[in-house]
Amino acid sequence: MFRGIFYGWYIVAASLVLIIMDGLLLYSFGVFLPYLNEEFGFSRAIGSSIFSLRSVILAFSLTLAGRLVDKYDPRAVIISGGIITAIGMLLSGIADKGWELYVSYGFLIGLGDGVLYITCVAVVSRWFIKKRALVIGIITTGIPLSGLIASPLTAWLISSFGLRNAFFALAGLLTLSTLSALALRGYPHEKNLKPYGEQEELSTSTVQVTLDGLKNNNNDWKALEAIATPVFWLMYSMYFLGFTTFLVIVIHTFSFAVDLGIPALVASGALSAIGIGSILGRIALSGLLTEVLETKKVLFLCFFLQGSSLFLLLGVREVWAFYLFGVLFGFFYSGLVPIFPTLLGKFFGLSAMGTIYGFFGTSFCVAAIGGPLLAGYIHDITGSYFYPFLLSIFFCYAGAILSFFIKPPIRIIRPITSVSQ
């Protein structure tokens, strides 16, 4: 390795690969869904319930992963989760009955997947003080990169080699990619380094640092303290609303396009367009706009315009409209992802970042449990995706309104009184 390169950037590169794999698990299911429904005779709601079960298990896994990464070597945490996930994908290709999919895809993949995203965000946050929002934006770009790659890759694997062989191929890819976790280190001091951007005069023996690079003068909140604040639950609700919309789109847009007679490979391009828009959005919104505009105003714009982009799906049926929608939707959704963990670090410090963010991430799981399942159920009743998409617009507009109520929390520290003898 070149001495001039700060080791934290190797952490960023490895984390990017791992989060791409996390995104692959997300984006590929929407492509698998219509084929699973046909293979096993599922309705839209029943097929979506596999993803919902995965999300129930993922909620537990995210919380567990946050605690594990605060206590143990992130390499062991991620490799263990990656192996479990690959086994789940492999067994999904072997499954002959519907309940077997619930075990392999719903349980095992949900259990293993939780460690990939949370661990990477928590570890990278420890390595960077300066440019933290940037590096979180870089690694979380792995999700839209997956959207760019995973959807057409999965559609091609299924059309070329069949449903079951597609599961086997993705299991092998997950196994190989998990090896990038060997580059991770939990803290800079393990490499005799300081976090990037820490002032030179600060001692490397400092346990943690705050967002501004100052010593820990009671600025790092305990996990239970942070979770008990109103602003935590406000942001939790916003995250839930934003991701409910996102997951309805990711899980059902492919089926929506196929229902309209669009060929499978062409239909998968809409999800790839979301990936392209997300990459551009993370650069423009979280990387640049947050430097000149108040964070809650950026959140308002992201939520409002993410919801507004859905009107393209309500009124237009041409292929170009799907692709334009994908770019616009991905662009504005992407700004939400790095902003929330950055705010959590700013408000609550880093000593319990893994646990705090792990619990915060369960809002994604709650959205994933209900959103795609509800959309599938409404489709089964009405025969249309009009009402699920309309409901998604409402969720986004609600998130936009809530963004104006975000305020830094005030920590109440009880003074220690001494009794004179």
Image (cartoon, rainbow, N blue to C red):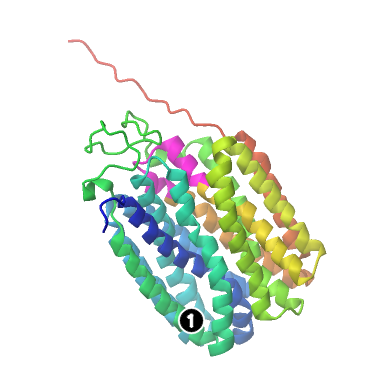
> What residue did someone put label 1 on?
167
Q: Quadrant of the N terminus?
A: bottom left
Residue 13: x %, y % from top left:
39, 59
Predominant SS of the magenta segment:
helix
Q: Is residue 208 above or below residue 323?
A: above
Give whichever of 60, 263 is nearer the camera. Answer: 263
Name which quarter of the figure residue 32 lies in.
bottom right
Mark 1 crowdedness (10 Å alpha carbons): few <14, some 14-19, many ≥20: many
* Residue 236 at least partly seen: no
Label 1: which secondary element: helix
Which portion, as a residue range, is magenta? Answer: 339-357
Give whichever of 234, 338 is nearer the camera. Answer: 338
Name which quarter of the figure residue 173 lies in.
bottom left
Residue 259: x %, y % from top left:
74, 77
Residue 311: x %, y % from top left:
77, 57
In the displayed structure, does residue 408 sit left or right of residue 79? right
Residue lying farthest top?
421
Residue at the (72%, 73%) spot, across then down: 257
Residue at the (31%, 52%) spot, across then down: 5
Amino acid of disc 1: Phe
In the displayed structure, does residue 63 sit left or right of residue 263? left
Q: State how many labels appear.
A: 1
Does the magenta run of residues contain 108?
no
* Residue 330 at least partly seen: yes
Name which quarter of the figure residue 413 lies in.
top left
Q: Is residue 315 above or below residue 255?
A: above
Residue lying farthest left?
421
